[in-house]
Every structure is written in structure tokens, then in C-alpha cells.
Image (cartoon, rainbow, N blue to C red):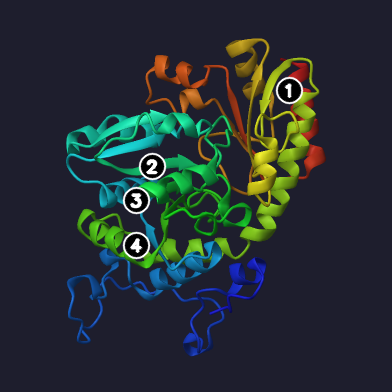
Amino acid sequence: MAKKSEHLDTRIVHAGDVHPRILGAVSMPVFQSSIYEYSGETSYHDLKYIRLNNTPNHQALHRKLASLEGAEDALVTGSGMAAISTALLSVLSAGDHLLAQDCLYGGTHEFIARDLKSFDVSCDFINADEPASWKKKIKRNTRAIYVETMTNPLLQVGDLEAVARFAKERGLVSLIDNTSASPVNFRPAQRGFDLSLHSATKYLNGHSDIVAGAVVGSRSLIEKVTHRLNHLGGSLDPHACFLLDRGMKTLAVRMERQNRTALELARFLERQPKVARVNYPGLENHPRHHRARELFDGFGGLLSFEMKGGLKAAERVLGRVTLPAVAPSFGGVESLITRPATTSHSGMPAKERRRMGISDGLIRVSVGLEAAEDLLADFERALAAA
């Protein structure tokens, strides 16, 4: 395993590797076996079995993820929602109460607002930018607080340091979805968060060819999440583990390019007369730009914007761009464009979307690895026709 003193770029390539190499193989082989011989394990959770997420392919990923975020341990799951739901169900029990940021990915919002009720878990939503207001919503049975690094799709940046501090002072478990930043731009454990969650489908894998998730944090909490996941069955296939491991080796160079191109595109869009507003924390006029500069090593490859012409103008833009694929998800090598009202937040009632600030005409862009000049030219042509 790479030494802790090595640079993040080096650990992205080498952390988690098996030494000595397996029969000299430079790449981690795929262990496509669902079962393994018993070797004296005393706990059910230690038996080698794909559903228990502890085959050699899983373990290599766990070591790598923990190293990248500077945490004690990590766990991969079958999807980002498997990571989110299992982590929450591991730290919350019947009768507990959760505080959660009021603008979250649609799937997470629905799980918290709707599904947790069936487990007798209540929730209050908070403005992550107003720490003074959180005290009014905390209860005797509050057990955890949940936020996103940069919210999807409005790219808000809450007072993350205050969140971690608030949780520590009150004995709450702090959880943060770090998908939009990736460990290249932000490492939650180093800022005091207990659990960091990822849809590894996005930047960690980076190639739009698998669905996976990850939970990173302290050894004791990861053990709790592992035991819950073992029973819920949200395992990741060994071949998907192999693809995720391979994809992560280029994470640093991909994020560096996507950080740079997204900032160029955001600055281009804010100069366009037909664009009403651009949401990107790298812009100097973003309301929390200075906070983002202090927290992050880069501002990510995700941005959103509103057209002055509303929904019809937004649909014309989506119909005229040629490089970005009109598709859900983000974080891949190809640029993607979508209206969150029809994809990531389509499951939410329109009234709730509007309350969060997500209009039907909001456009979200995931910047890929295309040349920035080509991407800007494509948007310039699309905006001219809109």
C-alpha cells in the first residue's frame, strides 16, 4: 500500500494494491468467485463471500478509498443509494430523529422524507448555511445530521465546518455526500465528518459504465454499516469492483481537467445575455465562493444555469447542443446535459422542487474531458439558436 506521506495523485494510482503482486499481475485480477474456502473465521461477517463485500477485489477498493480520504476504513456498495440508505439505517433506529440539508439529490430527499417514516424515523430539514437555526430543530432523540458537499443541482456550499463541529459538540453522527467533489477536491474525514458517502457511478469510476457506491469513515462506523449491508444485500459484483478500481486510477487527472473546463464554461455562460443565472462555486459572484475556496482544492465538474426564456428556451438548448449527451447522471469522461426536473429530481412533487429553487427550466451540465474550446463553441451555437 502507498505510504500516507505520498501525494494524493500517487495514492490514487497505488493505494490498495496487493503486495507481492498476484502471480506478477500489475493490474488487480478479477476474482470471479462467489464463494471461498473456510479458513477458520469465527464471525459470519468475516466469511469470504461476494454478498459480504469482502473478496480480494472489494478489499483492494476499501483500502484505496480509505487512503484517499484520510479515513480509517471504507466499504463499497451496489449503488450510491445503497451507500446512502444503508449508512442512514446503520446510525438511526426506530424513534430517532435526523437533521438533513433542505436541498439534496432527489433520491436522497425522497428516501429521507418518505421512506424513513416507515422505520419510525423522523426528520427536520435545515438550511445548511444558517448554523444558528439548527439548535431550534434539534431534539432529544436527534442522532445524526446529513448534508452534501456541493448540492445537486444548485451547487450550494453549506457551512460544512460548522456542520461537523455542531455534530461533535452534540454527539451526533455527521454524514456528507461527497460525490460532487470527489476526494480530489474535498476529504471530509480531515474536516471532522464521521461518514463520507459517494455514488461511485460518478467521478470515482468516471466512465459511465457501472453503478456503485461507497461509504468512508471510522473503523467502528464502517463495521456497523458493513453488518447492516450484509443483511440488506447491497453488494458490488467483483467485475464492477475491477472497473471501479481501474477507473479510480485516473481520478486525479480527470478531476483536474474537469475542474478547469467547468470553470471556463461557467464564466462563459455568465457572460451570455440569454442566461439569467449560473450556479457554480468557482465563480466570484457565487454567494459562497470564498467558503468554497477555503474548503475545496477544486470546484468540480458540475454546474447548472437558468435561461431567461424559461422552460422553452432550456428545451431549445438541450435540443441544439451536439457534444453533451442529453442524459442523467454526471462525472463521466463525456459531457452530459439534463433538466433535473425530468431526471435527478423527477420523483419529487413539483411544489417541493420549486420550493428548493429547482425550476422546470433549470439546466444541469456535467463537464467531461472534451477540449474546452469545442465545448464552449457548441454552447455558443446552441444559445444563439435558443
Residue marked by disc 3: 171
Check whether the beta carbons of the residues at disc 3 and disc 1 lie within 8 A of each other: no
Decide: few, some or many residues near mark 1? Use Cα within 10 Å; few <14, some 14-19, many ≥20. some
Quadrant location of residue 224? bottom left
Residue 262: which numbered mark, if any? none
- Residue bearing mark 4: 222
Q: Which residue is mark 2?
A: 145
Distance, label 3 to label 1, CA atoms, is 51 Å
Q: Which residue is mark 1?
A: 382
As displayed, is residue 337 above or below residue 219? Answer: above
Q: Earlier in the sequence, mark 3 or mark 1?
A: 3
Q: How many labels sit on residues?
A: 4
The tag earlier along the polypeptide, 2 or 3, is 2
Q: For the residue marked with disc 4, what is the amino acid?
A: Ile
* Viewer-side residue, 138 vs 39: 138
Mark 4–mark 3 distance (CA, rounded to whole Å):
17 Å
Q: Nearer the viewer, residue 316 or 250?
A: 250
Q: The disc labelled 3 sits on which kind of residue?
A: Gly
